[in-house]
Image (cartoon, rainbow, N blue to C red):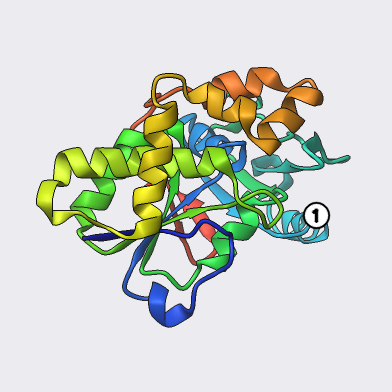
Amino acid sequence: MEVDVQFLPMGPPSEFLSSRAVVVIDVLRATSVIVHAISRGAMEIIPVITVDEAFRLAKTFPAETTLLGGERGSQKIPGFDFGNSPREYVAEKVRGKRLILTTTNGTRAFHAVSSAREILVGSFLNVGATARRCLEMGKDLLLFPSGDEGNFSLEDAVCGGMVINHLIHQGGDSIHLTDSASAAHFLYQQFKQNLIEAFHVSHHGKDLIHKGLEEDLVYCAQVDLTNVVPVFREGVIKPA
């Protein structure tokens, strides 16, 4: 299995993706929200790019089973049910519900890799289960950090490096790393004793702290809270 990492959130060509599995990673905070909400019983999550698209799409579904979540500038969008903190998505609010989600980086990333053979949702919250699922599929793998408004994202790369660490330990000689995958693995080694340190030194992590959202950093740094690995297919994220 070849493992690659796309450090900048630019969608690779369709022919490159068509035979590969992809793991989308946006630990601060979209994929953490998605993994958490699905693990708490959300029926499905539809990631969309714009706020207007979210409002339009919501009108096509029954209001009693449809919720809006997401952020702009890391803040809850007016008229939405939730912001972009995984702590908001508790079971009593999301169980059995459809969630339409739009965020600055994460939801856009899913559409950038939509032509991939299989698309998984990864975060620290489900990192071990994500790696196991990748090994089970046995396909060449692209880890796709969602980045920070088009720029490199340290915390997403570290999470990708942790997935790679699991793959190496479980897959042995069958795992072949590209240079970018090796770089992500080296980054993980730097922060593995204190994952939240990567959040504190990253641009986006510092911005969330400045906006009073440091509790989200603590929550999103938790490892293996769930074995749920959501899958993005035909525009919708559902439990595997």
Could you tell me the amino acid type at mark 1?
Val
Q: Residues within 10 Å of mark 1 (few under 14, many from 20)?
A: many
Q: Where residue 212 sits: x, y (%)?
A: 78, 20
Q: Is residue 87 above or below residue 132?
A: above
Q: Judging from the image, what secondary structure is the residue with disc 1 in?
A: helix
**On the rendered structure, is 182 left or right of 146?**
left
Q: Quadrant of residue 229?
A: top left
Which residue is tagged 1?
51
Q: Is residue 163 visible?
A: yes
Q: Residue at x 73, y 46 (%)?
A: 63
Which quadrant, please, contains the N terminus?
bottom left
Q: Is residue 32 above or below residue 51?
A: above
Residue ranking furthest to the bottom: 15
At x 44% / y 27%, what residue is drawn? Answer: 191
Q: Position of residue 67 (x, y in %)?
A: 69, 41
Residue 229 appears in the rendering: no
At x 46% / y 79%, what residue is drawn? 14
- 168 vs 147, left or right, is left
Seen as rendered, the residue at the extreme left is: 173
- The residue nearer to you, when weighing 222 against 198, is 198
> What percent of the width, then of the height, locates residue 36?
51, 32
Q: Nearer the viewer, residue 95 or 202?
A: 202
Q: Quadrant of residue 8?
A: bottom right
Toward which corner of the image does residue 52 lie, by quadrant?
bottom right
Query: Residue 177, position in %: x, y?
Result: 28, 56
